[in-house]
Image: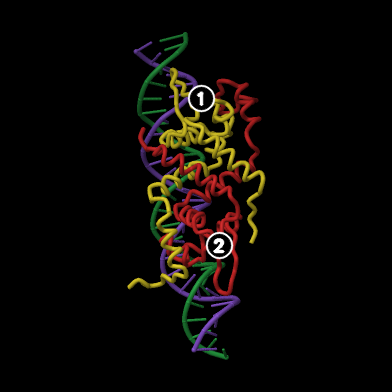
Chain colours: A yellow, B red, C green, D purple
Amino acid sequence: MSTSSHARVVDADRVSAVMASLPPEPAIEGLAQVFGLLSDPGRLRLMAALLEGGEMCVCDLAAACGQSESAVSHALRLLRLNRVVKVRRSGRMAYYRLADSHVRMLFDLGLAHVTHDEAGSRD
Amino acid sequence: MSTSSHARVVDADRVSAVMASLPPEPAIEGLAQVFGLLSDPGRLRLMAALLEGGEMCVCDLAAACGQSESAVSHALRLLRLNRVVKVRRSGRMAYYRLADSHVRMLFDLGLAHVTHDEAGSRD
DNA sequence: CGCTCATATGAGCACCTCTTCACACGCACG
DNA sequence: CGTGCGTGTGAAGAGGTGCTCATATGAGCG
């Protein structure tokens, strides 16, 4: 029963080859998660701010990005849990900074793509 | 009226500077949209398959990626509308391929990040 | 010509995400 | 040492996203 219900295949060899070459599931999932972190305008603004500002506290981040402090705190928590940002505490303040430079590369690469080609939405 | 309702600010100068340096809203939105396309494991698998397979029809893509043909068709439509893939029709078949190389760069960069650092989920 | 196959599309539904609201916590400062 | 401020967190609701199922379209084939 290889042809189960609906599994039409045109080029079985290519299908096998492609299947073998696909990254393992954990890598795919991790990739999706990373890109998911970058798929929110709010978080994107935060990251852009940190790219420019270097190290900023929550309230300044909120002010600069035009978001509520609570929303920023939630967003930063997510980014923190995914090792995208690091926090330094000083008294009751919390200063955030980017953890690595991958973000900058992804950000710039994506930005180049977007500003160069509007990624239109036509048929 | 700088101190509106809740806008505590520590370093007003830095906040202004960062605000001025943030990419314009359309760019941010476009960025988020692009990364959003890359944030789904199913679409990621499709793109990985096309990176390797070059050009494939819907049913082979579905077989190689372990998804229903309907799901693949929906996903490809999204990617098509965002100019990520191109389609070539031949008879009743539809052959899809990647539209540009940005995807490959983003994919590889993200993959390097993921496989190098597991992007853990601890506190 | 009518039937089937490959793909496309629409509706409906389950799930996940992001925001706000309300409150907890710890540190500074009087 | 109590009060205020900066921040963190949980619950809840609105909205978006991706799946499946059913059906449409259009090309090949008998």
Asked whether, in this view, residue B118 is left or right of residue A71, the answer is left
Q: Position of residue B40 (x, y in %)?
A: 47, 51
A3 or A58: nearer the eye? A3
Q: What residue is at 55 percent from the left and 65 percent from the top?
A: B95
Where residue B66 sits, quadrant-wise, is bottom left
Q: What residue is at 44 percent from the left and 45 percent from the top?
A: A33
* Residue farthest left in this picture: A1
Asked if residue A34 is positioned above or below residue B86 in the image, the reply reads: above
Q: Looking at the picture, which amino acid does disc 1 mark?
A: Cys
Chain for disc number 2: B
Asked if both marks, 2 and 1, belong to the same chain, the answer given is no
A5 or A89: nearer the eye? A5
Crowding near the residue tagged with mark 2, few <14, some 14–19, many ≥20 C-alpha atoms within 10 Å:
many
Q: Are marks 2 and 1 in contact (CB under 8 Å)?
A: no
Closer mark to the observer between disc 2 and disc 1:
2
Q: Position of residue A45 (x, y in %)?
A: 57, 36
Which quadrant: the N terminus of chain A?
A: bottom left
Disc ID at residue A57 = 1
Chain for disc number 1: A
Crowding near the residue tagged with mark 1, few <14, some 14–19, many ≥20 C-alpha atoms within 10 Å:
some
**Distance from label 2 to label 1 (Cα)?**
46 Å
Which quadrant: the C terminus of chain A?
A: bottom right
A15 or B25: nearer the eye? A15
Disc ID at residue B96 = 2
Q: What residue is at 50 percent from the left and 30 percent from the top?
A: A98
Asked whether, in this view, residue C23 is left or right of residue A63, the answer is left
Query: Which element carries disc 2, helix, strand or loop?
Result: strand
Asked if residue A76 is positioned above or below residue D2 in the image, the reply reads: below
Disc ID at residue B42 = none
